[in-house]
């Protein structure tokens, strides 16, 4: 929620004013919110969440976001998301934000302010107009000519200076209530108990008997059919909902802890589904499920000759792979630590030494390989189970390169978290994992599940829920 503890005597708008209703004076002039860069970094989509106010983003803020977008950390990721949000609004409303355009939330509007920066007032108060923060304050001063204006910033120094210049100042906290939700690969459907009885009796039920024609699910999409206390887990195959087996598979001794993991294992172990996408935040079990299914199908069932794990080498800071000491295996080892951790969790006692021994043994037998996506070009993958981990950091062109390497009898699994993207210029909608999910939707060979429940530990679950 937005904390609007203003620093002037004019009645302060409440949190409801900022997100659910604008503040206006007796003449009907609406409140104008001038956003600082720190607000868009903390909450990149916040411009879509304010209701019934006029949002103003100074051009200086856009310049600062442009300077931050190439950083390979959370700040760079947020800057890219904020810029894409502004760009989508610009394209949707004729190509310019010089004039106010509706944001789609209540009657809120958004505008990028280029002029009307009161440089002479800044200079009179001893503030250098070439400093970006001071220019943002100058833009807020200019906006106050058109109506009651509040500077929204998480920078305490900027709020202090803004208040000194006679501009209302308030802090902002992220709000997530209005974020759009992407397809997650399963849904809950209420139906008559007779339909569930028929489903259990026949093992399948026609889609038309449960859903309206316009509500038809994608191929391999899962559902929970529910009628009171009765329920059934099903999967869309052709024109039917097929009942899932009562006893789910436990590959490599791994038992699914929730229905989402159960759905994911159904896709991972199905030989007819050759491309699988698993999306989800940290701790939901994406990589663990994929590794367990791969070891089961390669080592136990011999359905594939090898489990090949590929990860993109997206450097953080200047820690590029070429600057790391040692040979290729030693250079790749830091990037493959997540795979090692997954295998540790699959050992009988969660022992790191046992996991390293298993990795070495399977590698020597040619049943496991850990490589960089960089080395995929020119390859032909035959009878392999291929895991592309951290796929959200891959560009769509790399996705095409990977899938065109797939030969007969090969299964490809993409895992990643589309909310945690480290690669510059990629976002939640244009990374390889999102593009794959959109392009392959409703294909018989493809399945997708978004895992949401954190199962790593109680602490991890609380962190995912509260932070």
Image: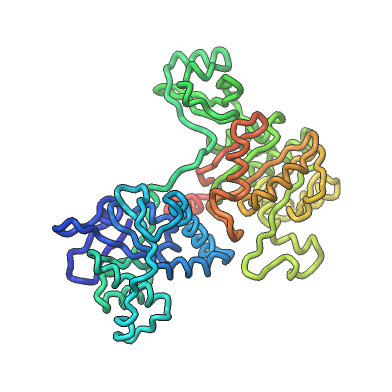
Q: Is residue 462 visible?
A: no
Using residue 241 as the reference point, say whether residue 288 is left or right of it. Answer: right
Q: Tell me where residue 117 appears, x and y as whole percent.
A: 34, 74
- In depth, the one of 169 and 92 nearer the eye is 92
Question: Depth check: 245 or 171 in front?
Answer: 171
* Quarter of the image that includes the N terminus: bottom left
Point out the residue furthest to the front here.
94
Whether residue 77 is visible here, answered yes or no, is yes
Q: Write down the quadrant of residue 160 in the picture.
A: bottom left
At 36% from the left edge and 57% from the top edge, which residue is drawn? Answer: 110
Total residue callouts: 0
Up the image or down, 196 lies above or below 428; here it is above
395 relative to 290, above or below: below
Q: Seen from this angle, which residue lies furthest right?
A: 365
Compared across the picture, whether 334 is left or right of 154 comes to: right
Farthest residue, direction left: 26
Q: Quadrant of residue 440?
A: top right
Residue 172 in percent (x, y) is at: 34, 62
Q: Residue at position x 47%, y 52% from top?
A: 91
Q: Position of residue 316 (x, y in %)?
A: 63, 65
Residue depicted at 67% across the width and 69% down the height: 319
Residue 73, above or below 179:
below
Q: Position of residue 197 (x, y in %)?
A: 49, 14
Pick the front one: 106 or 288: 106
Rendered position, 231 above or below 155: above
Q: Residue at x 58, y 65 (%)?
A: 70
258 lies left or right of 343: left
The quarter of the picture where the C terminus appears is bottom left
The coloring applied to the image is rainbow
């Amino acid at each position: 929620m937005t904390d609007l503890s203003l620093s002037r005597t004019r009645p302060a708008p409440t949190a409801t004013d900022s997100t659910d209703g604008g503040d206006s004076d007796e003449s009907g002039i609406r409140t104008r919110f001038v956003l600082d860069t720190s607000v868009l970094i903390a909450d990149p989509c916040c411009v879509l969440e304010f209701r019934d106010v006029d949002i103003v983003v100074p051009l200086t803020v856009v310049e600062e976001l442009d300077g931050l977008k190439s950083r390979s950390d959370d700040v760079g990721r947020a800057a890219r998301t904020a810029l894409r949000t502004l760009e989508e609004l610009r394209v949707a409303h004729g190509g310019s934000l010089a004039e106010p355009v509706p944001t789609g939330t209540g009657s809120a509007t958004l505008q990028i302010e280029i002029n009307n920066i009161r440089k002479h007032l800044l200079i009179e108060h001893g503030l250098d107009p070439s400093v970006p923060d001071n220019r943002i304050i100058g833009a807020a001063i200019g906006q106050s000519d058109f109506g009651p204006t509040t500077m929204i910033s998480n920078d305490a120094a900027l709020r202090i200076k803004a208040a000194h210049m006679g501009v209302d100042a308030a802090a902002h906290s992220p709000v997530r209530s209005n974020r759009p939700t992407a397809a997650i690969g399963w849904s809950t459907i209420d139906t008559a108990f007779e339909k569930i009885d028929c489903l259990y009796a026949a093992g399948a039920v026609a889609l038309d008997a449960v859903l309206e024609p316009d509500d038809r699910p994608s191929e391999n999409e899962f559902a929970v059919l529910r009628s009171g206390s009765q329920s059934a887990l099903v999967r869309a195959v052709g024109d039917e909902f097929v009942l899932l087996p009562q006893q789910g598979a436990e590959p490599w001794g791994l038992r699914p802890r929730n229905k989402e993991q159960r759905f994911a294992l159904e896709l991972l172990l199905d030989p007819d589904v050759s491309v699988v996408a698993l999306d989800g935040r940290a701790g939901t079990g994406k990589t663990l499920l994929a590794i367990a299914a791969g070891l089961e199908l390669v080592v136990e069932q011999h359905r594939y000759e090898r489990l090949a794990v590929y990860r993109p080498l997206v450097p953080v800071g200047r820690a590029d792979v070429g600057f790391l000491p040692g040979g290729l295996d030693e250079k790749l080892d830091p990037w493959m630590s997540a795979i090692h951790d997954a295998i540790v969790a699959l050992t009988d006692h969660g022992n790191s030494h046992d996991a390293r021994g298993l990795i070495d043994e399977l590698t020597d037998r040619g049943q496991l390989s850990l490589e960089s996506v960089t080395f995929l070009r020119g390859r032909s993958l035959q009878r392999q189970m291929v895991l592309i981990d951290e796929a959200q950091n891959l560009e769509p062109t790399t996705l095409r390169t990977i899938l065109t390497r797939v030969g007969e009898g090969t299964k490809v699994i993409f895992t990643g978290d589309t909310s945690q993207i480290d690669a510059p210029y990629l976002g939640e909608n244009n990374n390889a994992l999102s593009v794959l999910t959109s392009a392959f939707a409703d294909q018989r060979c493809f399945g997708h599940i978004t895992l949401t429940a954190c199962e790593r530990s109680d602490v991890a679950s609380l962190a995912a829920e509260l932070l």
